[in-house]
Image (spheres, rainbow, N blue to C red):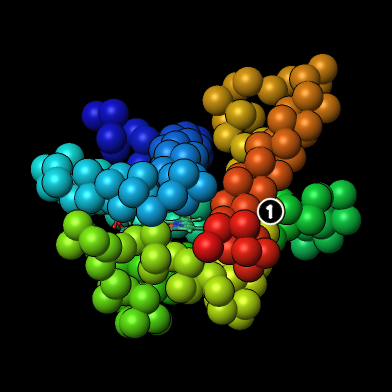
Amino acid sequence: MILKRLFGSSIGRKILVATTGLLLIGFVIGHMLGNWNMFFGREEMNAYAAFLKSIPGPLWTARIGLIVVFVLHIILALKLKMENNAARPVSYKSKNTQRASLASRFMAQTGVLILAFVIYHLLHFTFGQIEPNGFALTDDKGRHDVYGMVIHSFKNPLIAASYIVAMFFLALHLVHAVQSMLQTFGLTGEQSRSTVDKVSVGFAVFIFAGYSAIPVAILSGLIR
Ligand code: HEM
């Protein structure tokens, strides 16, 4: 059976980590584009958030799908890492560590930091536990004032900085994630290595800048 072959072999698990990673990248891009409504004003941002809540069927399908994909990605990636460590003799490991990039050496650590960020972020903007006053805001149409909530939060330099630092770790994770995913899907070779490196770094910088632009714009007074 296909599922048994995917979960039961190390190459199958590698394909699953790459596929779930690709789906998570899709979410990261989509969420960033949605967040850019902050640059168009209160009406656009709040209407966008209200629209998502007005379609509970697709919203909950996407939420549950996202949780399953996220959990699978973490478990399978950690399992692969443990298998690799167990299979590798110590001398080879220390030699390899010197050659490996910073991003590839810290995949597990940056992954755990992203998980910690997502929990903090959900407590913050979805459950309203970090800044209850901002979370309680409503706009003149009686909708949840997501625009006001985000501004209220990022006016606090500590909260804004915590997001920017988290986006840095997300970007670091993405550099190696994109390289590794393209390799698993057989899209890299000796000749394309430098192009793949440029694409992965360029994509990570784009995500870092695209997300960090919001706290930076609020801190600098560009969005009020
Ligand atoms: C500057 C960066 C970010 C901002 C301003 C931001 C903003 C928001 C806001 C306002 C919400 C709540 C939306 C609502 O209640 O209508 C939200 C939910 C969420 N965000 Fe972010 N976000 C950021 C970064 C991220 C990143 C990097 C990830 C993932 C790695 C992420 C994952 C999520 C998830 C999973 C939800 C819950 C979605 C749901 O309830 O269905 N966010 N975000």
Q: Residue furthest front?
A: 140
Q: Is residue 63 left or right of residue 42?
A: left
Q: Position of residue 189 (x, y in %)?
A: 74, 20
- Above or below residue 187? Residue 201 is below
Task: Please name the residue shown 79% across and 56% down the image.
Answer: 102
Residue 35 relative to residue 182: left or right: left
Residue 176 drawn above or below residue 79? above
Quadrant hosting residue 203 = top right
Residue 19 horizontal side relative to residue 114, left or right: left
Residue at horizontal 73%, vertical 53%?
103
Q: Which residue is mark 1?
A: 172
Q: Pick the quarter of the image with the N terminus.
A: top left
Q: Position of residue 112 (x, y in %)?
A: 53, 67
The percent position of residue 214, horizontal first and vertical second, equals: 57, 56
**Residue drawn at 66 percent across, 48 percent down:** 209
Looking at the picture, which amino acid does disc 1 mark? Answer: Leu
Q: Label 1 neighbourhood size at 10 Å, few (<14), some (14-19), many (20+)?
A: many
Q: For this rendering, which residue is in front, 8 or 173?
A: 173
State the SS at label 1. Answer: helix
Closer to us: 176 or 157: 157
Whether residue 176 is visible = no
